[in-house]
Image (cartoon, rainbow, N blue to C red):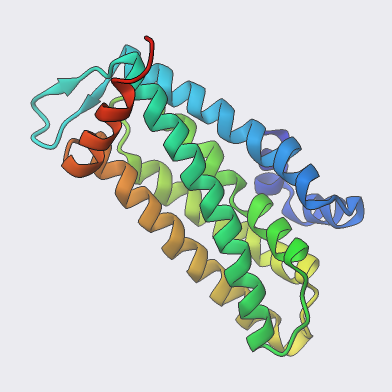
């Protein structure tokens, strides 16, 4: 979480420290990505069970059962991990279209740290009065801003291709995270019945 805040307020210095640390993929995953996702899942899950969510007609407040909230948060955590890994693969491929030879670790580093503000803003999803799209919009704007420093520093593209790689990377991450937000937002507001039925079926098998 501290790293996410530093990336927002001191992006150039934060990216430089990330570059010099030369962390491995598993280190970034377990020491940066997972703690943030687990913290956000706990906060949002608490909000769903305690305060609930307004449904699509904005007249019915649904307070989620503990089992349903647990299943939803676990599935959302897995979805966010998929976003990080798939996003890294896409950015690595984008780098190759700009005649660069980038490693998957470089792309993973950019995505894992670059999406930190988006993950952090999901803490707002714990409150029933905050639209899921508000947290996503603010989060992705901050991500796009910090990626401007991060993509060239971590990926080290040729100078003529740096802006193009940044622009395409930011666009693709906005699309991927937007699709993920679409699924979760529709579920939370009761508009995605197949997902709701699937989660209810899984939660019914839990011992609590």
Residue 160, image quadrant: bottom right
Work out which residue is located at the far top of the displayed protein and give it.
208
Q: Is residue 53 left or right of residue 141?
A: left
The x, y position of residue 120, in whole percent, is: 55, 37
Q: Is residue 44 left or right of residue 133?
A: right
Please name the residue shown 76% across and 61% down the image.
Answer: 105
Please name the residue shown 72% across and 37% down the image.
Answer: 30
Seen in the picture, residue 47 relative to 58 is either above or below; the reply is: above
The x, y position of residue 5, in whole percent, is: 67, 39
Please name the residue shown 67% across and 88% down the image.
Answer: 98
> In the image shown, does 78 or 7 lie closer to the viewer?
78
Residue 205, image quadrant: top left
Quadrant of the image for the N terminus?
top right
Work out which residue is located at the far front of the displayed protein and give it.
205
Residue 192 visible in rendering: no
Residue 57 visible in rendering: yes
The x, y position of residue 36, in whole percent, is: 62, 34
Please name the residue shown 78% across and 57% down the image.
Answer: 12
Seen in the picture, residue 74 relative to 160 is either above or below; the reply is: above
Quadrant of the image for the C terminus?
top left
Residue 34, image quadrant: top right
């Amino acid at each position: 979480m501290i790293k996410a805040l530093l990336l927002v307020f001191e992006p150039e210095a934060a990216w430089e420290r990330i570059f010099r640390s030369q962390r491995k993929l598993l280190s970034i995953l377990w020491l940066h990505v997972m703690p943030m996702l687990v913290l956000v899942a706990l906060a949002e899950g608490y909000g769903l069970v305690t305060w609930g969510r307004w449904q699509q007609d904005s007249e019915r407040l649904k307070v989620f059962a503990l089992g349903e909230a647990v299943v939803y948060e676990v599935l959302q955590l897995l979805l966010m991990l998929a976003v990080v890994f798939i996003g890294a693969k896409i950015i690595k491929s984008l780098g190759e279209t700009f005649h660069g030879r980038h490693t998957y670790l470089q792309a993973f580093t950019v995505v894992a740290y670059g999406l930190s503000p988006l993950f952090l803003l999901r803490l707002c999803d714990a409150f029933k009065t905050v639209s899921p799209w508000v947290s996503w919009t603010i989060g992705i704007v901050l991500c796009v801003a910090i990626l401007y420093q991060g993509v060239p520093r971590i990926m080290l593209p040729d100078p003529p291709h740096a802006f193009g790689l940044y622009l395409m990377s930011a666009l693709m991450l906005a699309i991927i995270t937007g699709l993920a937000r679409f699924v979760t937002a529709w579920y939370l507001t009761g508009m995605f019945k197949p997902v709701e039925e699937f989660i209810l079926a899984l939660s019914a098998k839990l011992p609590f």
